Image (cartoon, grey):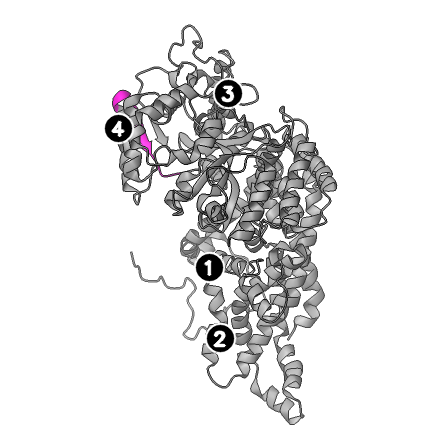
């Protein structure tokens, strides 16, 4: 099926420089015929598989879930119910609890989870030897399947005095903690697990950014008498701010959609102490069989995160220019 | 979508037809449905194919071969019916995708815990008309048959196994602690005392109960029954969570946890954790389904001599023990001929072995060959007299020390089975999980306030389900 590439429909002199060369900055209006003649169909044919994949597995489910949020369905018979799913979501006393817990998860993940990969990346970048080994080591937890990692930490957090962490604390003379059984400790404890499991990916991204910082900047700072911390503060961090701002937003977006870790570790307990918005959605869908309400809350979450992202990007636009 | 709608319409027509027949509720189902419909609504010799779930996987070659033998025998008996086995099995979070995708097998085995919701959502076919003339179905233990009967008295499934909640205890740990394994606790005070002794004299924790992923609410419902309360009324219209029985149950939780310190340190326990803890001897006593013998002995490697089952103790005014089990349901999008064939299959595969001596012996042999215990304690799905007869037929194949369960098996007929909440069971359990967790993790938990709040939450669930 290989065919020779047809010659360009508009003959151009060698070098491509000519009187009718497309001028930048001016939009050309193309007729469909011209598009076809320029090989548009070939482009389309190449693009089609991925378009179909997206349409079937991504866009169509989105359309369906928007529709489902105003429906009542058992997947056999479907009826339209207007806004009532949204009303029931907003009237649920658990919603406030779930949102508040999710905000706490996010806050803890910003406090614990955000600085760790930055620090690790800066330290690895400063290493003179074994930099590759160190970054591989940092990345290692990422390759552990999430549920396995969560179950591992669940065992570490065994609340009995013989539990792994409690034993270590016992050697230091610290009384055993209830860990996940204590609603006040459970959220930060889960955030520690999440940080351990995922800081490797962020570290790799930060390391890549650090490698692009021009060494002259450091040399100049050194000539100006800056200490190591001074160089990090005045050169490294400002040079990384674009990626830091994006990673910050991505982290908030992902923690707001937190499900696996609290679901496997605590099931949302104790006493709803780690109930997140996503767990609530799961309960609506798979405990209550109420898919309309589940999709309604999913949409609300998506809209809230969309607004949050827009506000964040607008507010930080000035800083993110490098 | 169009096809699904028209199938739903067909289902509605079938249901309307069926509505003209008897409104049986576990009672005498031998009455012929309609004069002209002797046998079933479907014609007898039309070719029909049904897909059947829970085909054992290839790793389980013996069980798979046994299944195939049964399917062949069935097809010899009914040459017009073709059985198409599929390994598809019920899972709470994939069942909706099966239904939505139209790939739910014609017959599917589901737990009692979920039949309520699927009946409410109309996701299972109405079998009333097809079951009306079934001899095997009319021999069902009526209290078991009731589980798969909906609020309008329609039969929506064929129960094939059943159990009641029981007190499970580890016989060797009892011996180690100086307790008599043949005299398990029969009151909740004795459970507390035994748990305390076991905690003090062995490495195990005395007692444990499930608390998360809806099992906390499930267990609290069972404990409420044992102390004389129910979370909702029988009609499923009113929340009754705030009742003296449930309060007494929670007081029991509080006492054995905080006063006796006999429940260990972890109170985030799901079904799997509980099974592992009991099988490994980490926990000496728990409340669990009495049919779990196979799970503990075959799957988790517990010694059969350690496994003890006692009837669920009853507090003042105790109502009985929560019952559960499995039920075969039929895809509501099936044709009438398929539904008819599905009911015949359910009868043949699941019920006939209790009624037909030859089949009983064959099943026992197959089970032994496949490593499935024969004669494990549980709740008979046929009436007591029939069950005794059945045990007689298979006596030489029984490989389970039934003498260890005499107290359980001798009282299982007298201890009432209380079914799970008829409406929104799983949702109610989810609402009760936090109550249990709060009492077990917070010494100062205000039980009255927790119950008052849960009462409101459960009422909201019931209102939404109406």
Pointer 1 residue: A145
Marks 4 and 1: same chain? no
Magenta segment includes B87 = yes
User: Do the dots labelled 4 and 2 sit on one chain?
Assistant: no
Give the magenta-colored segment's residue range.
B76-88
Q: Secondary structure at mark 1?
A: loop
Residue A53 visible here: yes
What mark, if any, has residue B12 been given in the picture?
3
Q: Is residue A144 or residue A63 the one in the foreground?
A: A144
Near mark 2 (Cα within 10 A), the count class, few <14, some 14-19 or many ≥20, is: some
The chain to which mark 3 is attached is B
Residue B382 at what x, y percent from top left?
Answer: 42, 22
Provide the chain ID for the residue under circle 4.
B
Q: Nearer the viewer, residue A124 or B382?
A: B382
Do the CB atoms of the residues marked 4 and 1 lie less than 8 Å apart? no
Residue A278, image x and y in percent? 60, 49
User: Which of the 4 image quadrants contains residue A16?
Assistant: bottom left
């Amino acid at each position: 099926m290989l065919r020779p590439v047809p010659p360009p429909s508009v003959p151009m002199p060698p070098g491509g420089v000519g009187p009718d060369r497309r001028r930048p900055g001016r939009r050309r209006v193309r007729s469909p015929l011209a598009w076809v003649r320029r090989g548009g169909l070939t482009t389309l044919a190449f693009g089609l598989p991925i378009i179909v994949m997206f349409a079937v597995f991504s866009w169509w489910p989105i359309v369906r879930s928007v529709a489902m949020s105003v429906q009542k369905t058992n997947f056999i018979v479907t009826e339209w119910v207007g806004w009532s799913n949204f009303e029931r979501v907003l009237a649920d006393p658990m919603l406030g609890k779930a949102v508040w817990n999710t905000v706490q998860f996010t806050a803890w993940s910003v406090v614990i989870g955000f600085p760790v990969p930055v620090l690790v990346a800066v330290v690895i970048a400063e290493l003179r030897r074994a930099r590759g080994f160190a970054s591989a080591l940092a990345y290692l937890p990422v390759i552990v399947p999430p549920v396995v990692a969560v179950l591992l930490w669940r065992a570490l957090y065994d609340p009995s005095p013989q539990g792994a962490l409690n034993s270590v604390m016992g050697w230091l003379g610290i009384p055993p903690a209830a860990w996940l059984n204590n609603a006040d400790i459970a959220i930060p404890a889960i955030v520690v697990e999440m940080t351990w499991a995922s800081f490797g990916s962020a570290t790799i991204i930060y390391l890549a950014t650090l490698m692009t910082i021009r060494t002259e900047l450091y040399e100049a700072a050194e000539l100006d008498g800056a200490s190591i911390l001074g160089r990090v503060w005045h050169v490294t961090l400002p040079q990384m701010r674009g990626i830091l701002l994006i990673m910050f937003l991505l982290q908030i977006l992902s923690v707001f959609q937190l499900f696996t870790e609290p679901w496997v570790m605590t099931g949302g307990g104790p006493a709803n102490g780690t109930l997140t918005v996503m767990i609530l959605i799961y309960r609506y869908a798979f405990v209550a069989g109420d898919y309309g309400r589940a999709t309604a809350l999913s949409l609300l979450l998506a809209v809230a995160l969309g607004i949050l992202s827009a506000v964040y990007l607008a507010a930080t636009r000035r800083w993110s220019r490098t | 979508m169009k096809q699904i709608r028209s199938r739903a319409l067909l289902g509605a027509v079938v249901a309307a037809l069926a509505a003209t027949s008897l409104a049986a509720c576990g009672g005498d189902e031998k009455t012929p449905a309609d004069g002209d419909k002797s046998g079933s609504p479907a014609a007898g010799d039309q070719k029909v194919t049904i897909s059947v779930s829970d085909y054992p996987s290839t790793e389980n070659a013996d069980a798979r071969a046994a299944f195939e033998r049964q399917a062949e025998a069935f097809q010899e008996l009914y040459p017009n019916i073709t059985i198409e086995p599929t390994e598809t099995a019920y899972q709470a979070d994939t069942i909706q995708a099966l239904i939505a995708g139209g790939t739910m097998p014609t017959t599917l085995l589901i737990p009692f815990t979920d039949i309520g919701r699927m009946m409410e959502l109309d996701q299972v076919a109405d079998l009333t008309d097809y079951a009306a003339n079934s001899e095997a179905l009319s021999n069902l233990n009526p209290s078991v048959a009731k589980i798969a009967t909906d609020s309008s008295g329609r039969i929506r499934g064929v129960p094939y196994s059943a159990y009641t909640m029981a007190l499970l205890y580890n016989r060797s740990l009892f011996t180690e602690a100086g307790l008599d394994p043949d005299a398990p606790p029969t009151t909740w005070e004795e459970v507390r005392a035994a748990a305390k002794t076991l905690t003090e004299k062995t490495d195990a924790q005395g007692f444990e109960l499930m608390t998360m992923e809806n099992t906390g609410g499930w267990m609290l419902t069972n404990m409420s029954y044992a102390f004389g309360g129910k979370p909702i009324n029988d009609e499923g219209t009113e929340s009754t969570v705030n009742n003296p029985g449930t309060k007494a149950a929670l007081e029991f939780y509080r006492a054995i946890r905080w006063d006796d310190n006999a429940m260990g340190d972890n109170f985030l326990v799901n079904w799997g954790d509980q099974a592992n803890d009991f099988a490994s001897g980490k926990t000496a006593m728990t409340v669990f389904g009495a049919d779990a013998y196979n799970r503990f002995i075959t799957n988790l490697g517990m010694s059969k001599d350690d496994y003890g089952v006692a009837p669920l103790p009853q507090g003042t005014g105790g109502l009985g023990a929560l019952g559960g089990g499995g039920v075969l349901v039929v895809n509501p999008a099936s044709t009438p001929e398929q539904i008819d064939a599905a009911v015949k299959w359910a009868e043949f595969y699941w019920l006939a072995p209790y009624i037909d001596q030859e089949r009983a012996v064959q099943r026992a042999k197959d089970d032994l060959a496949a490593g499935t215990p024969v004669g494990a304690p549980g709740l008979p799905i046929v009436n007591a007299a029939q069950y005794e007869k059945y045990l007689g037929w298979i006596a030489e194949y029984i490989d389970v020390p039934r003498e260890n369960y005499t107290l359980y098996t001798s009282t299982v007929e007298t201890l009432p089975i209380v079914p799970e909440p008829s409406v929104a069971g799983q949702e109610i359990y989810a609402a009760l999980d936090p109550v249990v967790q709060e009492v077990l993790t917070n010494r100062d938990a205000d039980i009255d306030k927790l119950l008052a709040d849960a009462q409101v939450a459960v009422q909201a669930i019931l209102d939404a389900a109406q």
